[in-house]
Image (spheres, helix red, strand yellow):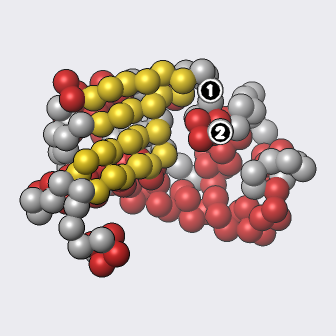
């Protein structure tokens, strides 16, 4: 792996936000399986694939709506794709520099990655975790306890932050 090429031995300190958190957790599980020391795993408002079971896969519009919701822009149901794109491209928004073509390409790619993530099994990692949860709005009603099948929650420290999913890194 690229991580092991860069740092052949632990201790490893991993962190990930959103989908990246689930990827960091999977990396921690694999490193631990290989006998490596994972000294720290930090998850920023991240949930396992199993938390999304039964939910429809995301198309481009669903990704655009989620991006807006994560940025605190709610009330997007029923809006046309063009309107969603316009909102995301407003000056000052994180995605504005991409332009329409770049934003649409990015959202299609993200929809594909999310579908791959939801189909993949979530490995178990029983090491310590610092979990930071965004409280506004609660991430689609998800709770850190949904990690229970994949982790030893007794070793977790959960921190609720007064921010949105997108604002958790501010």
Task: Say which quadrant the C terminus sits in.
Answer: top right
| Residue 61 in view in this figure | yes
Is 128 drawn above or below residue 87 in the view shown?
Answer: above
Q: CA distance from mark 2 to mark 1?
A: 9 Å
Q: Return the residue found at the far bottom.
A: 5
Cβ atoms at labels 2 and 1 below 8 Å apart? yes
Q: Secondary structure at mark 2?
A: loop
In percent of width and height, residue 17 lies at 48, 46
Q: Which residue is mark 1?
A: 163
- Look at 32% across and 45% down and name the residue there: 41
Q: Is 20 on the left or on the right of 38, as rendered?
A: right
In percent of width and height, residue 56 lies at 46, 42
Q: Is 79 on the left or on the right of 127, as rendered?
A: right
Q: Secondary structure at mark 1?
A: loop
- Look at 68% across and 48% down and name the residue there: 64
Binning the other alpha carbons within 10 Å of mark 2 as few (below 14), some (14 to 19) or many (20 upward) gives: few
Binning the other alpha carbons within 10 Å of mark 1 as few (below 14), some (14 to 19) or many (20 upward) gives: some
- Look at 62% across and 26% down and name the residue there: 163
Q: Nearer the viewer, residue 56 or 68?
A: 68
Label 2 or label 1, whichever comes before in sequence order: 1
Q: Which residue is mark 2?
A: 170
Q: Nearer the viewer, residue 159 or 103?
A: 159
Q: Nearer the viewer, residue 18 or 160?
A: 160
Residue 151, quarter of picture:
top left
The numbered mark at residue 15 is: none
């Amino acid at each position: 792996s690229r991580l092991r090429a860069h740092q052949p031995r632990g201790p490893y300190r991993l962190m990930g936000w959103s989908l990246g958190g689930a990827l960091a957790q999977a990396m921690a599980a694999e490193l631990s399986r290989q006998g490596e020391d994972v000294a720290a795993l930090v998850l920023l408002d991240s949930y396992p694939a199993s938390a999304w079971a039964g939910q429809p896969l995301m198309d481009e519009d669903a990704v655009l709506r989620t991006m807006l919701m994560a940025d605190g822009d709610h009330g997007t149901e029923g809006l046309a794709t063009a309107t969603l794109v316009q909102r995301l491209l407003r000056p000052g928004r994180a995605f504005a520099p991409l332009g329409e073509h770049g934003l649409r390409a990015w959202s299609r790619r993200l929809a594909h990655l999310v579908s791959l993530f939801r189909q993949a099994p979530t490995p178990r990692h029983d090491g310590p975790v610092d979990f930071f949860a965004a409280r506004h709005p609660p991430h689609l009603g998800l709770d850190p306890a949904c990690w229970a099948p994949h982790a030893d929650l007794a070793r977790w420290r959960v921190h609720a932050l007064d921010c949105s999913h997108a604002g958790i890194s501010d």
